[in-house]
Amino acid sequence: MTEEIIIAGFGGQGVLSMGKIMAYSGVMQDMEVSWMPSYGPEMRGGTANVTVIISSERISSPIIKHFDTGIILNQQSLDKFEDSIKPGGVLIYDSNGITRHPERKDITIYRVDAAEEAGKMNSPKVFNMIVLGGFLKVKPIIRMENVVKGLKKSLPERYHNLIPMNETALQRGMEIIVPVA
Amino acid sequence: MEKELRLMKGNEAVAEAAIRTGADGYFGYPITPQSEILEYLMEADPYHTTGMVVLQAESEVAAINMVYGGAACGKKVMTTSSSPGISLKQEGITYIAGAELPCLIVNVVRGGPGLGTIQPAQSDYFQATKGGGHGDYHLIVLAPASVQEMADFVELGFDLAFKYRNPVMMLSDGAIGQMMEKVWLSPQKERSKTVPAWATTGKPATRDRIIITSLDLDPNGQERFNQKLVAKYNEIREKEVRYEEFQCEDAEYILVAYGTSARVCMKSIQLARAQGIKVGLLRPITLFPFPTKRLNELAGKVKMMVSVEMSAGQMVEDVMLSVNGKVPVYHFGRMGGIVTEPEEVVDFLKSKI
Amino acid sequence: MAQATGIKEIIKPENLVYRKTKVMTDNILSYCPGCGHGTAHRILAEIIDEEGLQSETIGISPVGCSVLLYEFIDIDWQEAAHGRAPALATAIKRLLPDKFVFTYQGDGDLAAIGTAETIHTCNRGENILIIFINNGIYGMTGGQMAPTTLPGMKSSTSPYGRDVKLMGNPLKMTDIVATLPGTYYVTRQSVHTPVNVRKTKKAIRKAVHYQKLNKGTCFIEIVSNCPSGWKMTPVEANKWMEANMFPFYPLGDLKVPAEENAQKTTNSEKND
Ligand SMILES: Cc1ncc(C[n+]2csc(CCOP(=O)(O)OP(=O)(O)O)c2C)c(N)n1
Ligand code: SF4
Ligand SMILES: [Mg+2]
């Protein structure tokens, strides 16, 4: 099993930390993982993306052009990465702020309105956990217990009191993700 | 004691491994994409646990000369930087090589020349493997291709540096520095309580004074010293070559690549083999000494070799020298901070078959 | 309709109160919100424009957040290696003595790696202007400690606060160069309020004037902010700067030309 994922959005959306939690969850499940961020001056311009690979085998290139799953959180990233998803792959996006929705017919598209949901939950910080929940519903490659372990590993100890809230957010994400016909 | 599993950036792994291997001192100056090393060490504050000194210098020039001073005291000292900063260190490095001192220098390479980009590149190969500064000397050059190797080569680097009294360079790049992977960390080692006999420690009545210098005003003396260095480098060539072969057994074509490019090529090989092209990878782990012998042997069995590097073609010269005309050798790779894509390598290979 | 006519009536040349300086390019500034670099660029461009220097100027941009300064001001530029701008400026001014030559450097660039060039350029009294943006941190590389970082101040390489016993004391380069005979005019200013902007602009204009008269090195420090590196909002950053940076780096002239001093004395004698 190898899952090649791109997560892309604005810097403040927790793109990199979502990737890190995903990667740590993979580690907890005894998988090989790699987490490769975009780095450099463009981060100041506000966009951020990270490639996460989770695999049962040794990972070859951490930098790739085609992805099994794209998790896309803003319009710029959708424009940039929609074509990078492998035929038959999955695109998950949050429709908040999206003016041109994804158009590809050869992939499966899901919408997870996580920004809206985070607003309802009154905690914008869990936005990325809602998205991650949605991803895990569609691609159950990591068991929930390992995701929670991964969360614990990637959060500094002083934030461990927030873990139950993050679990709730993961659950919400699983509930609200919908396929786009 | 058991090893500890962590998910870390390559840069962080270097820093943590330095503490755990019992390094005595780190001297650095911020530069992207490796500033995390200094930042990690400042946060970890090993001075209060192992006694390891960590200092932010006023420049790379100062940092490498701090390394010079510390190394001459027999201490396990290191510095890290990225390409423009490594250029500044070259003067210090040639003095360290000329004084036969051990130390570890990490270059997390970015695109050049000049200020260039901050993205990953492999364009400092010549500088690392051919000396880099003035005079006849070599560094031992290790090329990590994973976060695990970023950690492991800190210890290996210090071991080789002390074994041969020679500076060791870890030639990494922005991709390996910035990415996170699993890494198994060795347990904490104690810092050494003793120093080698050649170190300046203050002269007791029982021994002659020790002078650390690279100066010899007598050309005959200097030549004798140069010959001694040559003998050392030949011994290193004999004993310290390290490489990894990947699917070379039945290969008709060989990709030669180190670091990030080697990882890219592993993917290219998957893709090419799916199309029925029998291709393998030779990944040099030591760039000096270079796996010349093995490449020459392989050249007798394959039809072509491609040196895949994120540069205008530097290692390709060493591949050509190794192959010595037996088969065609090409270079392929992106530049300027762009990482070569696995598909591009396959396309290039197909264009040459 | 009435409204549209209203706007048309307002947009007339005689009603213009503010516009982009001609000498600024159309490129969008790459700075974080609230960063002082943009303001400093703007007044520098205004002076170049107002003094008619566009075709007479060669600027040297540093390695730091303002590395792309050459994208923003429409003059000829040279981009130096980290810290070496004064060396480039020295050669430029000596080879093209009629040109207006200035460097624009951050505190890491000027006061850490470039200390030797800064001091020796000032000591030789090179007839150039050095503009020194002191924000107490390495902005570009992500907020590491600079030689100017205040005691106790946190940065990514002094995460527990700058410990002066281990990391040294903040370096007041402006005070140091003021002691050198080669410097002619040395001042410390800021650009965080309109009043301060006007003062800094006046200082730059003076430096241009002195350079025309071949008087020696003019050195203008601008104490500035780095909201991103300091991890503050722009408003917090400016408040923090006033409360912490200014007491340590007091604003005002450190060295004024002898003639000006003399003039001041005669003026005050007249008043007596
Ligand atoms: C030789 C060399 N060393 C290090 C760097 C990395 N570097 C780029 S900018 C910078 C410091 C910038 O700080 P400062 O001069 O204070 O400017 P600011 O960004 O704060 O305006 C450093 C260390 C480099 N580019 N070249
Ligand atoms: S990092 Fe600091 S100095 Fe650089 S642009 Fe942002 S606020 Fe300005
Ligand atoms: Mg600064």
Image (cartoon, rainbow, N blue to C red):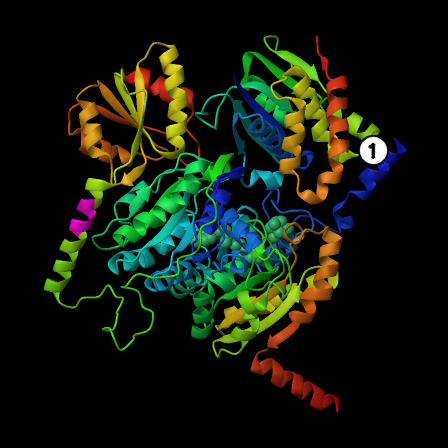
Q: Can see residue B230?
A: yes
Quarter of the image where the C terminus of chain B is located: top left
x and y, in percent, of residue C190 in the image? 67, 63
Label 1: how many Cα within 10 Å (few below 14, some 14–19, many 20+): few
Q: In which quadrant of the rendered view does residue B278 lie?
A: top left
Residue placed at 57% from the left, 49% from the top?
A: C142
Q: Is residue C140 left or right of residue B113?
A: right
In this rendering, the answer to whether C253 lies above or below A76 is below
In this rendering, the answer to whether C179 lies above or below B197 is below
Magenta part, dominant SS: helix
Residue placed at 28% from the left, 48% from the top?
A: B139
Specify the quarter for ligand 3: bottom right
Q: In which quadrant of the rendered view does residue B121 lie?
A: top left
State yes or no: residue C6 in magenta: no
Q: Is residue C214 left or right of residue A102?
A: left
Taking depth in this image into account, of B300 and C212 the one nearest to the observer is B300
x and y, in percent, of residue C236 in the image? 75, 55
Residue placed at 48% from the left, 79% from the top?
A: C181
x and y, in percent, of residue C168 in the image? 54, 68
Residue occupied by mark 1:
A122
In this rendering, the answer to whether C143 lies above or below B6 is below
Which stretch appears magenta?
A: B230-235
Q: In which quadrant of the rendered view does residue A166 lie?
A: top right
